[in-house]
Image: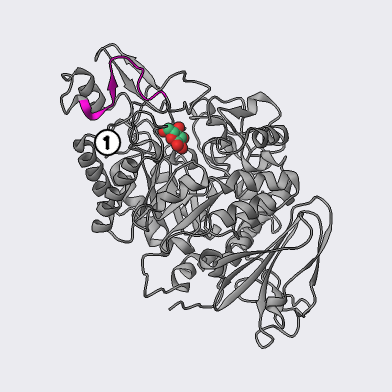
Amino acid sequence: MTVHTSGASAASSRTHIARRTVDSEHPTYWYKDAIIYQLHVRSFFDSSCDGIGDFKGLTQKLDHIVDLGVSAVWLLPFFPSPLRDDGYDISDYCGVNPDYGTLDDFRGFVEAAHAKGLRILVELVVNHTSDQHPWFQRARRAPKGSPERDFYVWSDTGHEYEDARIIFLDSETSNWAWDPVARAYYWHRFYSHQPDLNFDNPLVMREVKTILNFWLDLGVDGFRLDAVPYLVERENTTGENLDETHSVLKAIRAEIEARNPDCILLAEANQMPKDTIPYFGQGDECHMAFHFPLMPRLFMALAKEDGAPIAQVVEDTMRLPEPCQWALFLRNHDELTLEMVTEEEREDMWQFYATHRRLRINLGIRRRLASLVDGDRKRIELLNALLLSMPGTPVIYYGDEIGMSDNPFLGDRDGVRTPMQWSPDRNGGFSCAPSVSLYLPPVVDPLFGYEAVNVETQREIRSSLLNWMRWLIEVRNAHACFGRGDIRFIASGNSRLLAYTRCLPEEKVLCVVNLSETAQAANVDLSEHEGRVPVDLFGGCRFPPIGALPYQLTLPGRSFYWLRLSSQDEAPTVCEPCEGGGTKPELPDAQATRQTRAEARRQG
Ligand code: BGC
């Protein structure tokens, strides 16, 4: 049974999420109602003034995440690492990089986050290790054919598995690298300093289980499974999505299920739809998988002012095993990947979003959300409205809630991993270290730099992107149909207007998105909902009732509606605030901050 309570203030929205849905038959489906906030400990907040973010700093800043209204935090890798791939090159799976704090700091963080109602997801990066990992150092010295050597994948010739593509095209020319100590080649799907583990060796799986249990015992609520399509290699295959890889994932699932059935697995499988869906198995592999097929199509639809690419991919991917859910995202810590679109589509995306070569990496675009759309607030809002109303669980990348930009002059993908911009103060309020010690420079350009774009300023401005995002999230959180309902696209006769319903038996919402820069009108066939009254989820305004004839909708350029299709009885007789919406949530401390500042100014 699903029980809804009424909308609550933003400050209590997190507890609100936890209480809103009580699902007694399936208590472990919490992730279907979640919104995930992705962040890097090193980029968030530096409590020790050494220029690098840390767990204590992150713990201090948890209220920002709670105030946003999200319900889970996904942490990028924070384990000991030589940091040649920003932590995805792990040298110790059961520790914390000393730059970020200690295991006790991690414990403190998890405790504080849980107390505030936030779930924690960490990374499980076991396709490969760092070449500095003791397993690799031992393997390269161990006798050929020994179990220690066979922790990794070796070759005498470097000619096996030639059908496997190279992923890091800008930096690697082969998936094999020569190791002078082992006097053999080792296999790596990513950087050559990241040798792939050998899942044909049962000892590797034993270690993976130890790692899972270590973090489960520390209270984590989920794992993002990095680079899962490539776990196993076989001759005459692409080395991606193999049955053997799916068997490994089933074993991982069984392990976490036995220890904590509430814990989830989130797959990073950047594949075509037909190859991505199998990562859910029959509901016995990953609970969630990133919707890589949808992500580029959201941007394409906006660029082409045509909703068709979105509708097509969503329809192709909407049938999932019951406990499963897509994880939706616009941007993350990597490039906006264009591996799984046609060459023509990729070329169009580059032309539209990354005309300069410097803005590209491998087959993608290394820019943040705000800079991709030239800081255009309307397009940022539209993309977020799509993100929060498509079927799945939205994932928001840190800084995108305030419209942070990137620094294209930094190497690799560092340009989208710059320090969180907290205030207009030195180093954007991220750290009090001398700026020369910062792990990366903050963004300083006049449009997006921390003096213009930061949390402190946006908390005080009612119309800021941050406050708008909080409103959007609050409205979404108040309507279970966004996380759990089905989706149906409705022909609007105008390809620039994308119309779809999100429905549960007890709740129906109509979403209409105008992808065009200019005003659009359409006659939408809503006869199925005849007699219902559309009510705006944000302001509570009542629209004309739906009749037997097509329903006329007009929208200004790049705008959207979320309309509850209420019965005549439920609908307000006049425009009035409705559940979970109605008024833009005021931050509890905004007024207080204003007063304190005014006071300080008065006192000189
Ligand atoms: C991560 C990347 C990383 C790669 C290799 C990915 O899928 O998201 O940031 O470079 O794995 O570990």
Residue 212 position, x and y percent, is: 27, 47
Q: Quadrant of the N terminus?
A: bottom left
Q: Which residue is mark 1?
A: 199
Position of residue 585 relative to residue 454, above or below, is below
Q: Which residues are magenta?
A: 150-162
Q: Quadrant of ligand 1?
A: top left
In percent of the image, x 61 and y 30: which residue is there?
Answer: 407
For label 1, the crowd category at 10 Å Cα-Cα, with few meaning under 14, some 14 to 19 and many 20 or more, is many
Amino acid at pointer 1: Phe
- Model colouring: one colour
Residue 498: quarter of image: bottom right
The image quarter in which residue 354 lies = top right
Name the spot of residue 237 as percent of width and height, x first.
Answer: 39, 32
In-front residue for pair 159/199? 159
Q: Seen in the image, is 450 located left or right of residue 44? A: right
* Residue at horizontal 53 percent and vertical 22 percent from the top: 170
Could you say whether the residue bearing mark 1 is in a helix, strand or loop? loop
Is the distance from the Cβ of mark 1 to the nearest ligand 1 atom less than 8 Å?
no
The answer to if 5 sits in the magenta stretch is no
